[in-house]
Image (tube, helix red, strand yellow):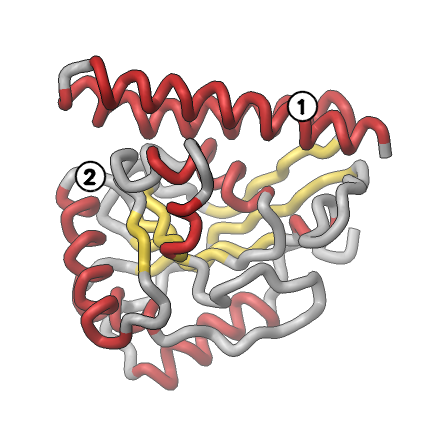
Amino acid sequence: MIRSVLVHAVMVVSGLLLSLYGLFLMRFAPRGVAGRQLPAIGALWARITLAALRVLRGVRIEVTGEIPAGGGVIIAAQHQSELDIFVLLTLLRRPSFVLKQELQKIPIFGAVLTPAGLVAVDRAGGAAALRKMVADCRTQLAAGRPIVIFPEGTRVAPGAHAELQPGVVALARALDVPVIPVTTDSGLRWPRAGLLKTPGPVHVTFGPPLPPKLPRPDFLAALAARFYGQQASGGNA
């Protein structure tokens, strides 16, 4: 437990310090410099956290499948743990995450999310919020960044199923780019509740892309099959 608490301490302290540095760049650096540096700051935070997790708790990341080399794709990722965000930040090149608007209210950290190119969504905003999400994601795609969305809408425990949110379908149709499902068993090592981290591998699998123009029921059924019918290799390890 002490080692697990230390991992959290590294995550929080490094996140705070790097967020403060991001705010400094936003205030004093030229706009173009700050825009380029903020995604790199997020990736550095992820690498620091993963290094602490590996050294202190013996958790390692094992990846299968083809990782996209650049933008032009939507990553539809399973979400079991905070760990998923750190893993994708390190594996993908300058990813832009679709996240809930409430995260912007976190002191200091929340202030750098939108300037870093992340897409905040008002989940109670209805059609207007969906249109804004699509427009913001289109901007990030045009900048060469992959879009990461968690269709489950929240963290889901290993072995549990969630009703997938249809926003991923609307996003895929509007942007007309391939959707790559990513499965994980991260919740076995970093649970969604509690501090204890369990040593061992985390399996992350990049699956074959789904066509963006599939009818909504077929698209969601295919994505659910990838998430729950074909869990990441070694999911019970």
Q: CA distance from mark 2 to mark 1?
A: 30 Å
Q: Is residue 11 left or right of residue 112?
A: right
Residue 144 circle label: 2
Place of residue 22 in the rendered image (x, y in percent of width and height, measured from the top left): 34, 22
Q: Is residue 26 left or right of residue 200?
A: left
The residue identified by callout 1 is: 52
Inspect this view and state whether residue 233 appears: yes
Q: Residue at x 43, y 49 (%)?
A: 103
Q: Residue at x 62, y 38 (%)?
A: 62
Q: Is residue 21 above or below residue 235?
A: above
Which numbered mark, 2 or 1, is in the foreground of this view? 1
Using the image as rendered, state which of residue 87 and residue 234 is in the foreground.
87
Q: Is residue 86 above or below residue 152?
A: above
Q: Residue at x 19, y 18 (%)?
A: 33
The residue most toward the right is: 1
Q: Is residue 209 above or below residue 146?
A: below
Q: Is residue 97 left or right of residue 27?
A: right
**Quick one: SS at disc 1?**
helix
